Image: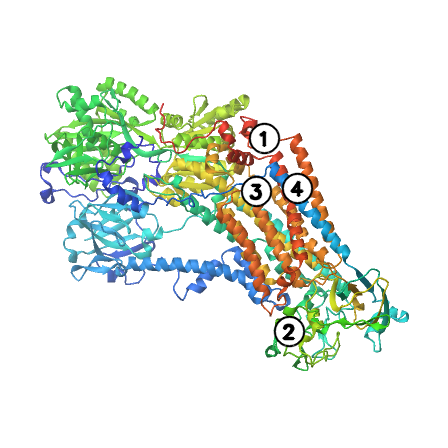
């Protein structure tokens, strides 16, 4: 990877941007010499890297205070001031001693716990002691304990893995030789030798490698997930010296540790010479060395300061829309709580005031304590004002669960459960990348059910980013017939030295073209065709890797490189008999239909975004020197020899046809260099690549000078294949009412054609194209568009296509509003030629103007800003590395998984969470209200008939588990129904699952139910011998039964777990009540048995249950029957099978079919 | 298919595939992980709802009727005596009278209006007496009542915890305020035996109140709240105290005083010689003497019967109403044409 990816335009729109080769050059004089004796005569260059931006940056002086100094092979001096950390890592958070304080400190970061704590502390004041010590602290202690055990276990595992990691061995240069040393003892400044397939223990600057040119290959799977090989370089200056480590004398001045894994800048001073170092000179902890026997490097960052460790950060934290909405109701509940407490305090005040003269003689009050003083002193009476004050706060303590703090904990548990099921969903498992769904953010599961806007990247997201060679145009002639996909043609293979070599990937070939290449150089046409494929095989930076197979005689050739386009081209060349089998820094070996040919790589001008092309200069076996150039059509036609005008014209026509088919095109050109040309180029190239200042610019200029007067060889067309199921997915999402915006870096024609093939655009849509070069024209076309849609009212059938240049004028201008208005009326929006920062800008444009939820999905580094900006970010773990995944909230393997993710899981999660919040409000408020009604009959003092243990256990044991189980498992509709009828997704978009209206209905029901639970036994037992504990037990059991039956009434799918949770909770509550009542030292001893013996108890219970649930039952039925929601109808249809009578609208997601092409 | 190019790894592929499957991250398939557990999904159809209401009314109306009958069967005689038992001149300051010394005997005659079969329960009923007052209910020591070992556990009993440093047994406001009106019943000048044994819960006598715990320092404080206890009788036998200590849930309550184990005939006059000692006057508390039989459902209270009849009636009416609505304006269940997007196509 190179840093431009994140700085520049997106990598997709320039087909070969990914190329970042830094091949050095061998001189013309020894182009025929073999690899072994290169050393003596070779001209060494200061740096092979011509990485434009980074190079110029690294030549800037690093300020002393921002730098760290590393003396090579002198760790003692380096670490003199003990400022650098050692290489032992510690991902574990706690030690045995720090566990308790630190863990508690971290847990109390949650507001919920602080509320618990404050209430518990208030309760400890003697004046306010409502509950006993145990009962008041138990809920908090329970939650803290559970979390602490979980944290401790996780930390234990981290300790264990740390220990394994720290005790791995590495070869360190010490006392004149390399010795094995544990990783944790490695220090900054030491020189380390890493061997092939070993993992790097720390970040180090390369000094030397087994390759004479100083190249190493590393695989960075552990770091960023990319499995292709990347090349890194040792500086030429250090290569030679490394043979004699003792004399190594120099230092590196590099930037302070940071987390940018794609950037590094430093200077190295060695023997008085100053060199600049860039990201291509450093290899990072966690990488694996490949294809290189060994590499030597000096440690610059160790342990916790390595880039890999600095990047070990958690997922972003977001807060779900539902939770934000819920906070409003929490405030309402707080007000309600305050009202209840105020009523309690006020009525108590009135009673105390009216009886102020009798307080001493009232038998159940007895204000004075006479035991110490004859006159008596006030006992627990602090004066009227204070009594009111204390009553108020005691009421807060008693009614504390009105604020459903347990809801927050339940929600976390529910989300973990939901995440478990999303992760384990078989339909969101991607076979090709072996990746299952990942939930990185745990707070926003339910947001997935409310998405209204979808922003999608194209390459790698809608498409596979697996390029497939489709068409070739040679000399203006199109060869685009391909053999059928299922043909028995075994693919190209060739026998070399008794071993059969086979490219790893089969490419479907055009039989005519294949025949043509086979005829050799017989005809002019055949010659051109051969030249074409030779240039495809040679003009690239692909590294062939030959791997063994189960058959010892067959070897597979795998092409590794950073650009998928180049890979496709090389595989294509291989299929036509131009098999690239070896690449070293000095030469490449190509097997041309059985004949192994060796080409010396004399020079390589890598791709840059200004030239938009790359070139190689090859010394061919016939001693000629040839220049091969490939690049984007726009940049290539300008450097072509005009004398081939006819061919150029033909090619242009073909290219237009290709790109309208959604293919990515490249043009290839070549020319033969004569000696003087070569000499001239060579000297200027030498000069440029040794220059210390402005190297990149000079090299670019050299390349520009030589890349002229090219003869056109041909053009290629590569298909960026749509991912499986993308058109169906987009259609489903659109039916679901989600507005799909596709943001791509591709050309307009390519983008539009992809739009058609992905069914984003349809034939009957009117396209509004905005393609402006100035602010004014942009404004004009937008306003025209706005007016035209307004007049026609055809909103379903308009597509807006806007390009990056126009977006420059739109964003950050007052035009944003107009664009938003237009976009709202369109059903599809396609933005092409968009730069990464614009992607985020577009998301922000929508997000700031609507309260609807936005989702961004992408796979590359260029999508990171967009993913972070949107309410929900989804990363595709695809070909382009892991940055998108790292920044995302959810990660998955394929675009089409969005459909089950949103329509099924999102819908479920939203419905479950919405119901769960309402239910938790209800469940806690019912209990609080029962307590409150009783206060009106206890002389306005906060006595609770329900035992304090039952009050505490109510929200922990009696009623907690069913709501969590329902929140995780209940499904309002089956998966297939939701997929068949994407319109059902609208429930979440219209926020029907949770709203303030529903909240108020629930609260009215709550008041009714609490009244029924309280007053039925009260009237039934009025003036009887009933004692507090017995009545309290009746209320407890009645509340638990009613609350659980209320839930049972709303459960949609009853499986055995649901049954167990609901009935189990009622049984558990009864058991708890019984256990509490067999403790003889509690006042309620044996009460439940005494009261349970009476018929009255059971008559009351039955009356309570029926009376409290009756209104809800009747109204629920009326609403569902006469004003059915879509979900309700779908549920009936699902059960009765009436959907089968009508045609399903949606698409079967399991279809395995080729995305239809036009 | 579409991904030939990407995945056809030639001959090598088949060899690795079994190993690859072992390490695959593919989620383990089960009905549970795919959320496909067999489940029953009931929906509220009119048939279900109407029959539910009918069933409820069929159960509730008879239950209401038998509850009412049970309540009607109970014969009770209630006599409020708090004001009547204060001599007319003293009624201006009832508190002073009740706090004053002297004999506060009061005679009451109760008329039996209906035959009462034994056992007849004698209750005292207090009204406006908050035995559930927070200050009051907390002022007790349950461990002290059980065993002499915990005699000194009196911290919760304030302000009635000790006398001169000696713990009071039983301590606390509840015990201190023990009801101390006494009734002596007679019929036709023959005294009527009131059995005071077996009025408390057996569980309380056996496990909650110790048979080795004797009253100590009780009512020896500066002011006397209510009855005194015989220090020679263990708490487990002090049934009046045990009954009193089961604090009442509601401000109007009865406590069992004793049982008459003979029938009372209609027209009998019960003469009650009453010692009016208990001070409910400072908070306008009412005192009543109650003689009552019981039914299987408890005392005389029509509320439950009426509630059952009401709920049963409402359910019956609802069942009728829903049936009519169903017949007049039915909706075909699960008809996709009711779906919002089918009703007004285009308006997504």
Element marked by disc 1: loop
Instruction: In the rendered structure, find residue B54 and report the number of the disc placed on it.
Output: 4
Residue wearing tag 3: A994
Marks 4 and 2 on same chain: yes
The chain to which mark 1 is attached is B
Query: Where is residue A749 drawn, in percent x and y?
Result: 37, 25
Question: How far apart are labels 1 and 2 at the CA level?
Answer: 67 Å
Q: Looking at the picture, how far across and down is residue A995, in whole percent?
A: 58, 42
Q: Along the line of sight, which residue is nearer the eye, A621 or A1134?
A: A1134
**Discs 4 and 1 share one subunit:** yes
Alpha carbon of mark 4 to alpha carbon of mark 2: how far?
50 Å
Nearer the observer: mark 4 or 2; the answer is: 4
Q: Do the residues labelled 3 and 1 touch (CB within 8 Å)?
A: no
The Cα–Cα distance between marks 3 and 1, rounded to whole angstroms, is: 27 Å
* Residue A177 location, quadrant: bottom left
Residue that mark 1 sits on: B332
- Disc 4 versus disc 3: distance between alpha carbons? 33 Å
| Residue located beneath label 2 in the image | B209
Residue A455, above or below B137: above
Q: Closer to the N terminus: mark 4 or mark 2?
A: 4
Toward the viewer: A841 or A793?
A: A793
Is residue B347 something that shows in the picture? no
């Amino acid at each position: 990877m190179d840093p431009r990816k994140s700085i520049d335009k997106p990598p997709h729109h320039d087909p070969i941007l990914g190329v970042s080769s830094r091949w050095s050059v061998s001189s013309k004089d020894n182009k025929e010499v073999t690899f072994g004796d290169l050393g003596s005569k070779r001209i060494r260059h200061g740096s092979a890297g011509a990485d434009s931006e980074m190079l110029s940056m690294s030549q800037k002086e690093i300020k002393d205070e921002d730098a760290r100094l590393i003396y090579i092979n002198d760790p003692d001096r380096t670490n003199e001031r003990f400022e650098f950390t050692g290489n032992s890592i510690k991902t574990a958070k706690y030690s045995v001693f720090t566990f308790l304080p630190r863990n508690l400190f971290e847990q109390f970061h949650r507001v919920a716990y602080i509320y618990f704590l404050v209430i518990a502390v208030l309760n400890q004041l003697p004046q306010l002691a409502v509950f006993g010590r145990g009962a008041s602290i138990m809920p908090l202690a329970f939650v803290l304990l559970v979390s602490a055990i979980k944290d401790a276990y996780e930390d234990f595992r981290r300790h264990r893995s740390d220990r394994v990691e720290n005790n791995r061995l590495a070869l360190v240069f010490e006392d004149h030789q390399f010795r094995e040393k544990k990783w944790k003892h490695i220090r900054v400044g030491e020189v380390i030798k890493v061997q092939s397939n070993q993992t790097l223990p720390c970040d180090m600057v390369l000094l030397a490698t087994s390759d004479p040119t100083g190249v190493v290959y590393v695989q960075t799977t552990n770091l960023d997930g990319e499995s292709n090989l990347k090349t890194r370089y040792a500086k030429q200056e250090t290569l030679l010296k490394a043979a004699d480590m003792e004399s190594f004398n120099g230092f590196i001045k590099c930037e302070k540790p940071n987390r940018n894994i794609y950037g590094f800048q430093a200077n190295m001073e060695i023997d008085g010479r100053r060199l600049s170092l860039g990201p291509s000179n450093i290899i990072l902890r966690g990488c694996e060395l490949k294809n290189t026997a060994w590499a030597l490097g000096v440690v610059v960052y160790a342990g916790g300061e390595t880039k890999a460790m600095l990047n070990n950060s958690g997922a972003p934290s977001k807060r779900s829309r539902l939770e934000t909405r819920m906070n409003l109701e929490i405030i309402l509940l707080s007000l309600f709580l305050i009202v209840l407490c105020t009523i309690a305090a006020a009525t108590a005040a009135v009673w105390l005031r009216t009886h102020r003269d009798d307080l001493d003689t009232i038998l159940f009050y007895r204000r004075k304590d006479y035991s110490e003083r004859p006159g008596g002193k006030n006992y627990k009476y602090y004066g009227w004002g204070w009594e009111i004050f204390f009553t108020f706060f005691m009421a807060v303590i008693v009614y504390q669960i009105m604020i459903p703090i347990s809801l927050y904990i339940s929600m976390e548990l529910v989300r973990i459960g939901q995440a478990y099921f999303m992760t384990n969903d078989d339909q969101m498992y991607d076979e090709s990348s072996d990746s299952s769904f990942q939930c990185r953010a745990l707070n926003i599961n339910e947001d997935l059910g409310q998405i209204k806007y979808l922003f999608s990247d194209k390459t790698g997201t809608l498409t596979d980013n697996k390029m497939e060679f489709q068409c070739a145009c040679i000399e203006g002639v199109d060869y685009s017939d391909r053999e059928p996909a299922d043909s028995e043609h075994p693919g190209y293979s060739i026998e070399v030295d008794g071993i059969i070599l086979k490219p790893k990937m089969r490419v479907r070939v055009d039989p005519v073209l294949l025949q043509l290449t086979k005829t050799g150089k017989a005809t002019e046409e055949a010659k051109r065709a051969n030249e074409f494929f030779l240039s495809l095989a040679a003009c690239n930076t692909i590294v062939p890797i030959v791997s063994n197979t189960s058959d010892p005689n067959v070897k597979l050739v795998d092409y590794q490189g950073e650009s998928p386009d180049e890979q496709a081209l090389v595989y294509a060349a291989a299929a036509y008999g131009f098999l690239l089998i070896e690449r070293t820094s000095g030469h490449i070996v190509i097997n041309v239909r059985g004949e192994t040919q060796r080409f010396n790589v004399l020079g390589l001008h890598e791709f840059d975004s200004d030239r938009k092309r790359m070139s190689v200069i090859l010394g061919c076996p016939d001693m000629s020197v040839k220049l091969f150039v490939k690049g984007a059509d726009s940049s290539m036609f300008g450097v072509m020899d005009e004398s081939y005008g006819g061919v150029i014209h033909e090619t242009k026509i073909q290219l237009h046809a290709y790109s309208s088919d959604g293919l990515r095109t490249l043009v290839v050109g070549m020319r033969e260099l004569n000696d003087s040309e070569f000499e001239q180029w060579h000297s200027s190239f030498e000069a440029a690549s040794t220059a210390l200042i402005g190297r990149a610019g000079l090299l670019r200029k050299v390349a520009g000078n030589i890349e002229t007067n090219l003869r056109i060889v041909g053009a290629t067309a590569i298909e960026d294949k749509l991912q499986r199921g993308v058109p169906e997915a987009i259609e489903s999402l659109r039916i679901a009412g989600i507005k799909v915006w596709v943001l791509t870096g591709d050309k307009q024609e390519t983008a539009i054609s992809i739009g058609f093939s992905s069914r984003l655009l349809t034939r009957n849509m009117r396209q509004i194209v905005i393609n402006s070069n100035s602010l004014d024209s942009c404004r004009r076309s937008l306003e025209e568009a706005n007016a035209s849609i307004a007049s026609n009212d055809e909103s379903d059938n308009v597509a807006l296509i806007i390009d990056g240049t126009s977006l420059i004028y739109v964003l950050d201008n007052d035009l944003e509003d107009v664009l938003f208005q237009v976009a709202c009326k369109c059903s599809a929006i396609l933005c092409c030629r968009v730069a990464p920062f614009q992607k985020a800008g577009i998301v922000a444009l929508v997000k700031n103007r609507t309260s609807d939820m936005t989702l961004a999905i992408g796979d590359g580094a260029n999508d990171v800003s967009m993913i972070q900006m949107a309410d929900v970010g989804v990363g595709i773990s695809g070909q382009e590395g892991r940055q998108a995944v790292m920044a995302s909230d959810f990660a998955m393997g394929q675009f089409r998984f969005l459909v089950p993710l949103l329509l099924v899981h999102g819908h479920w999660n939203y419905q479950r969470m919405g119901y769960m919040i309402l239910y938790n409000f209800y469940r806690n408020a019912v209990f609080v209200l029962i307590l409150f009604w009783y206060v009106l009959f206890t002389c306005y003092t906060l006595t609770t008939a329900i035992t304090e243990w039952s009050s505490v256990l109510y929200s922990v044991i009696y009623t907690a588990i069913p709501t969590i189980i329902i929140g995780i498992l209940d499904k309002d509709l089956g998966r297939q129904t939701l997929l068949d009828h994407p319109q059902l997704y609208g429930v979440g978009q219209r926020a029907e699952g949770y709203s303030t209206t529903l909240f108020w209905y629930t609260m009215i029901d709550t008041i009714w139910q609490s009244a029924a639970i309280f007053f039925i036994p009260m009237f039934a037992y009025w003036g009887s011998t009933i004692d507090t504990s017995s009545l309290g037990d009746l209320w407890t059991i009645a509340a638990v039964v009613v609350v659980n039956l209320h839930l049972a009434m709303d459960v949609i799918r009853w499986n055995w777990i649901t049954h167990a949770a609901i009935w189990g909770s009622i049984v558990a509550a009864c058991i708890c009540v019984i256990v509490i009542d067999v403790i003889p030292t509690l006042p309620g001893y044996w009460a439940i048995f005494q009261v349970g013996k009476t018929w009255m108890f059971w008559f009351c219970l039955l009356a309570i249950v029926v009376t409290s649930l009756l209104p809800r039952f009747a109204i629920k039925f009326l609403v569902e029957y006469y004003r059915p929601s879509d979900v309700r109808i779908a549920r009936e249809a699902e059960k009765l099978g009436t959907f089968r009578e009508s045609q399903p609208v949606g698409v079967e997601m399991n279809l395995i079919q080729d995305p239809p092409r036009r | 298919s579409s991904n030939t190019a990407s995945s056809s790894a030639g001959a090598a592929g088949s060899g690795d595939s079994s190993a690859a499957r072992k390490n695959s991250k593919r989620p383990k398939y089960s009905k549970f992980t795919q959320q496909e557990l067999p489940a029953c999904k009931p929906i509220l159809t009119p048939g279900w709802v109407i029959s539910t209401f009918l069933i409820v009314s069929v159960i509730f109306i008879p239950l209401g009727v038998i509850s009412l009958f049970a309540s009607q069967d109970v014969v009770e005689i209630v006599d409020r005596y708090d004001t009547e038992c204060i001599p007319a001149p003293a009624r201006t300051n009832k508190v002073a009278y009740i706090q004053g010394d002297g004999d506060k005997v009061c005679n009451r005659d109760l008329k039996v209006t209906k035959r009462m079969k034994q056992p007849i329960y004698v209750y005292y009923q207090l009204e406006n007496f908050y035995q559930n007052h927070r200050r009051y209910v907390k002022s007790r020591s349950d461990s002290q009542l059980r065993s002499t070992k915990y005699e000194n556990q009196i911290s919760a009993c304030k302000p009635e915890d000790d006398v001169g440093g000696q713990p009071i047994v039983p301590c606390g406001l509840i015990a201190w305020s023990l009801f101390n009106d006494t009734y002596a019943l007679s019929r036709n000048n023959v005294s009527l035996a009131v059995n005071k044994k077996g009025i408390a819960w057996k569980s309380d006598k056996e496990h909650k109140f110790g048979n080795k715990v004797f009253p100590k320092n009780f009512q020896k404080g500066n002011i006397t709240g209510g009855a005194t206890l015989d220090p020679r009788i263990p708490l487990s036998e002090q049934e009046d105290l045990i009954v009193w200590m089961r604090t009442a849930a509601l401000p109007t309550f009865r406590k069992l005083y004793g049982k008459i184990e003979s029938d009372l005939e209609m027209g009998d006059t019960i003469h009650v010689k009453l010692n009016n000692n208990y001070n409910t006057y400072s908070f306008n508390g009412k005192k009543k003497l109650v003689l009552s039989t019981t039914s299987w459902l408890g005392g005389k209270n029509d509320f439950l019967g009426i509630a059952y009849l009401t709920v049963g009636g409402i359910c019956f009416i609802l069942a009728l109403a829903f049936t009519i609505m169903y017949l007049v304006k039915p909706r075909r269940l699960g008809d996709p044409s009711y779906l919002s997007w089918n009703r007004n196509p285009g308006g997504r």
